[in-house]
Image (tube, rainbow, N blue to C red):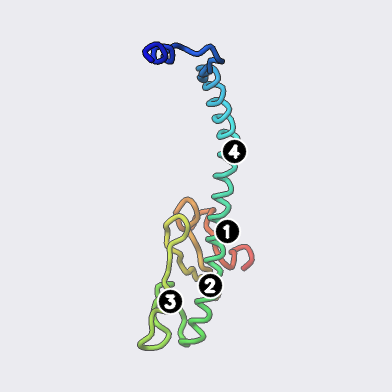
């Protein structure tokens, strides 16, 4: 019995499993490939994000413009500021709409020049009256 126990502690002569680790060069190659992919794909993702924000702002300007027209027809008053849309249509009701900021965190505004009116967003730069403003109807159409 003693010899049997001692014999079971000896190494077996079967196949020995070798454990292989990644070399530093292999890891560096993978990191470089990931970096190259991020450099090529990343700018395209940011470009699409910017496109989505502009599309959202355009849609919101159009919706707010239509809300102004409806509010004016219902209340029989001329809206001079978008904040007026937060008033209830009828006494005792909740506000007509709740104004939200544009995708860049700026407030929308109602711009009037004579009989032409536009609902605008300051756009990505956040400056009212700059080239990247988004308005509905667009100032070129009016």
Query: Mark 4 sits on what residue?
Result: 41
Query: On the rendered structure, is 94 left or right of 61?
Result: left
Circle nearer the N terminus (3, 2): 2
Q: Position of residue 116 (x, y in %)?
A: 56, 72
Q: Is residue 29 visible?
A: yes
Above or below: residue 125 compared with residue 57: above
Q: Which residue is mark 3?
A: 85
- Check disc 1 and report its element: helix, strand or loop: helix
Taking the spot 43% from the left edge, 15% from the top edge, the residue there is 8
Distance (Cα) linking label 2 and label 1: 15 Å
Q: Secondary structure at mark 2?
A: helix
Q: Which mark is residue 55?
A: 1
Q: Single out the mark in the foreground, 1 or 3.
A: 1
Q: Residues within 10 Å of mark 3 (few under 14, many from 20)?
A: many
Q: Of 64 and 119, which appears nearest the observer?
A: 64
Q: Nearer the viewer, residue 10 or 87?
A: 10
Label 3 vs 4, first from the N-terminus:
4
Lower position in the chain sequence, tag 2 or tag 1: 1
Determine whether the residue tagged by mark 3 lies in a helix, strand or loop.
Answer: helix
Q: Which residue is mark 2?
A: 65
Marks 2,1: beta carbons within 8 A: no
Q: Point out the residue furthest to the front here.
A: 1
Tell me the distance, in whole angstroms, between the alpha carbons under discs 3 and 4.
Answer: 42 Å
CA distance separating discs 3 and 2: 11 Å
The CA distance from mark 1 to mark 3 is: 23 Å
* Dot 1 or dot 3, earlier in sequence: 1
Which residue is at a point 50% across and 64% down the rendered structure image?
120
């Amino acid at each position: 019995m003693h010899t049997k126990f001692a014999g079971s502690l000896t190494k077996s002569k079967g196949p020995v499993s070798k454990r292989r680790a990644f070399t530093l060069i292999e890891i560096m190659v993978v990191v470089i490939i990931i970096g190259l992919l991020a450099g090529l794909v990343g700018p395209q993702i940011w470009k699409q994000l910017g496109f989505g924000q502009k599309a959202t702002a355009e849609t919101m300007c159009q919706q707010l413009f239509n809300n102004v027209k409806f509010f004016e027809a219902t209340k029989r008053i001329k809206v001079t500021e978008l904040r007026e849309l937060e008033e209830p249509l009828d006494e005792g009701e909740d506000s007509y709409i709740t104004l939200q900021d544009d995708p860049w965190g700026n407030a929308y505004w109602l711009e009037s020049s004579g009989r032409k009116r536009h609902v605008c967003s300051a756009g990505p730069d956040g400056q009212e009256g700059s080239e990247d403003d988004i308005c509905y109807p667009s100032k070129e159409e009016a």
